Amino acid sequence: MTTTPPAPGPLAGLRIVEFAGLGPCPLAGMLLADMGADVIVVERAAAAGAGLERTATDRGKRSVVLDLKQPAGLEAAWRLLESADALIEGFRPGVMERLGLGPEAVAARNPRLVFGRVTGWGQDGPLAQAAGHDLNYVALTGVLSLSRRDGAPPVIPPTIVGDMAGGAMFLAFGVVCALLEARRSGRGQVVDAAMVDGVAALSALVRHMRGSPWWPEERAHNLLLGSAPFYDVYECADGQHVTLGAIEPPFYAELLRRLELHDEDPARQHEHARWPALKARIAALIRTQPRDHWCALLEGTDVCFAPVLDLDEAAAHPHHAARGTYVQVDGRTQPAPAPRLSRTPARTPGSAPRRGQHTLEVLRELGLEDSGGA
């Protein structure tokens, strides 16, 4: 357990060692740190830059620089792992083993430690050693194919679906699950968080709905893939966009009423043959007014409406402002911790540490001199 005073949050008292990397692993560490865990990032000596600031995903963490190629640096890493509840890393399979810090070696010195690993393809399988990125993982699960419309290629999603949703979120979830089990058994285990596995899990409901009235195989009849006039993105007179999602009959009826389409019968909502003409009619109507007009008319009603905002607009939106969805840290806008807990709330986000900022502090906690640093 950590020797520092417990931080607020439901995970206070837990120590997580994060081996510095890119993408989903740092975000998983941020989620754990937001909830109060003492997340210590181990930076490689060669990557350390004096005074170099890190990113928002490093908020709430402590940073140490250790030269793992030197005996003193490796000993400091072992001391740190012996004091930890979990380890998280995002290297290709085999990298930690080559450092001498693989699951078997760690379990021999700290049997209760949870070993969290996040990769694109997983720790085993034919693609385990192949390079890849978010787009590839989403493609292999079949999920990317769902973004295709009107004969065009599938739309490239932002690097959120595979890396962050399929990787970071499932790594954090798996680590917390294993930590809860370790409290009962006293034994850690390996968490193999493959991004392809995570994205596949996220598609569970879609796969279940295939072939049902909610998800027909014929794309022209699938209301969730952009064919329905009441579930799509529309361009406004000013070039901005709005979204409509009036799937349920009462919401659809309300949409027709507010758009003054009084000659449209709400009972004929799911007559597919009528969809193209009605979509063209709604598109033409939306293009007659700027986005602000439609926000004033439709936002907050039961038509299931939202404007398409850019990142800056989103942070300033009244709903987000009221909930505190975004916070300012060092003059930059960051998302606030999520989800929200009523009794043991997350930490208030603060500055990310500089690389190696806490090396001396952590080494002293471990009873070591400054011999493991860069």
Image (cartoon, grey):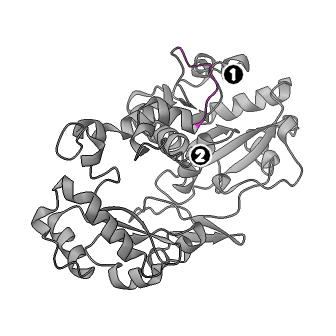
Under mark 2, the amino acid is Gly
* Residue at x 19%, y 63% (from the top left corner): 248
Q: Residue flagged by tag 1: what amino acid is it?
A: Val
**Residue 108 rendering spot, x and y as whole percentages:** 59, 17
- Reading the image, the residue beneath label 2 is 29
User: Over which residues does the magenta segment extend?
Assistant: 126-133
Label located before the other in sequence (2 or 1): 2
Residue 61 percent coordinates (x, y): 66, 51
Secondary structure at numbered mark 1: helix
Quarter of the image with the N terminus is: top right
The answer, for residue 274, to whether it is visible in the render is yes
Kindly identify which numbered label has been placed on residue 290.
none
Which is more toward the observer, 293 or 57? 293
SS majority, magenta: loop
Please state which of residues 245 and 270 is positioned toward the viewer in this rendering.
Answer: 270
Q: Is residue 177 above or below residue 287?
A: above
Q: Dot 1 surroundings within 10 Å: few (below 14), some, or many (20 or more)?
A: few
Residue 150 placed where, x, y %? 40, 47
Left-right relation of 125 to 218: right
Image-quadrant location for residue 21: top right
In this rendering, position of residue 48 left or right of residue 148 = right
Q: For the residue labelled by badge 2, is the local secondary structure a helix, a strand or a loop?
A: helix
Horizontal arrangement in the rendering, residue 91 relative to residue 170 (left or right): right
- Per the rendering, the mark at residue 95 is 1
Q: Is residue 152 above or below residue 372?
A: below
Quadrant holding the C terminus:
top right
For image coordinates 24% across by 37% down, the residue present is 210
